[in-house]
Image (spheres, helix red, strand yellow):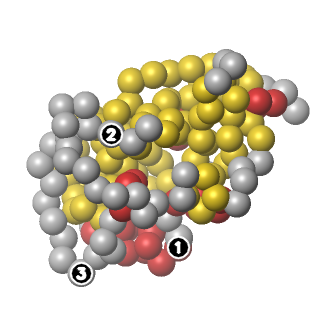
Amino acid sequence: MEEDIKVIVFALGTEEYGVEVDSVKTIERLSPITRVPKTYHFVKGVINLRGVVVPVIDLRGRFGLPETEHTEHTRIIIVNVNEMEVGFIVDTANDVIDLNTDLIESPPEVVGGIKAKYLRGVAKVGNDRLLIMLNLPEVLNKQEIIQLEDMGE
């Protein structure tokens, strides 16, 4: 069924990704991250976000992309995943677009080296722009969520 949704556009390297605005709580500048021992390699630690401890995940690490230096454009997108707040470190996040769901197609097996299970689909925006839509509940599996929930307590 055709529906318009608002999407936050962010980048990892040269690829553009999107998450629905409804899933995003806020977008923050990179702040000091407190490391937590014995976590997954892509979990960078926790931040204190206005009194709430939020686990922070490096999406580059999660997707197996090479790490890069953080810049002034680096952002942490705070999203709700399975009723838990999680921060995703991204290279940039500076666009909100309206997207018709009819433009989202099923993802190919691998997009930019990222497994299809993490993806909701690929949206054609304009003539030559592709937007990779994330499937947030699949970005973290249940065991990872349980470990992150323990970090926030």
- Position of residue 46 in the picture relative to residue 15 (left or right): left
- Pinpoint residue 69: horizontal percent, then vertical percent: 19, 47
Q: Residue at x 30, y 65 (%)?
A: 43
Q: Which residue matches tag 3? A: 38
User: Considering the numbered disc 3 on the image, is that residue within a helix, a strand or a loop?
Assistant: loop
Three-letter amino acid code at disc 1? Lys
* CA neighbours of label 1 inside 10 A, class few (<14), some (14 to 19), many (20+): few
Q: Residue drawn 32% across and 47% down?
A: 89
- Marks 3 and 2 in Cβ contact (< 8 Å): no
Placement of 147 over or under 27, stated as above or below? below
Q: Are marks 3 and 1 in contact (CB under 8 Å)?
A: no
Q: Amino acid at mark 3?
A: Lys
Residue denoted by label 2: 91
Q: How far apart, in angstroms, are the residues tagged by discs 3 and 2?
A: 25 Å
Q: Amino acid at mark 2?
A: Asp
Of the pair 33 and 69, the residue shown nearer to us: 69
Q: Residues within 10 Å of mark 2 (few under 14, many from 20)?
A: many
Question: Label 3 to label 1, Cα distance in Å?
Answer: 17 Å
**In the rendering, which numbered label is found on residue 142?**
1
Compared to 132, does 38 lie above or below? below
Q: Nearer the viewer, mark 3 or mark 1?
A: 3
Picture coordinates of residue 41, whole percent (x, y): 30, 72
How many other residues sit within 10 Å of disc 3, few (<14), some (14-19) or many (≥20)?
few
Q: Residue visible at 70% across and 60% down?
A: 109
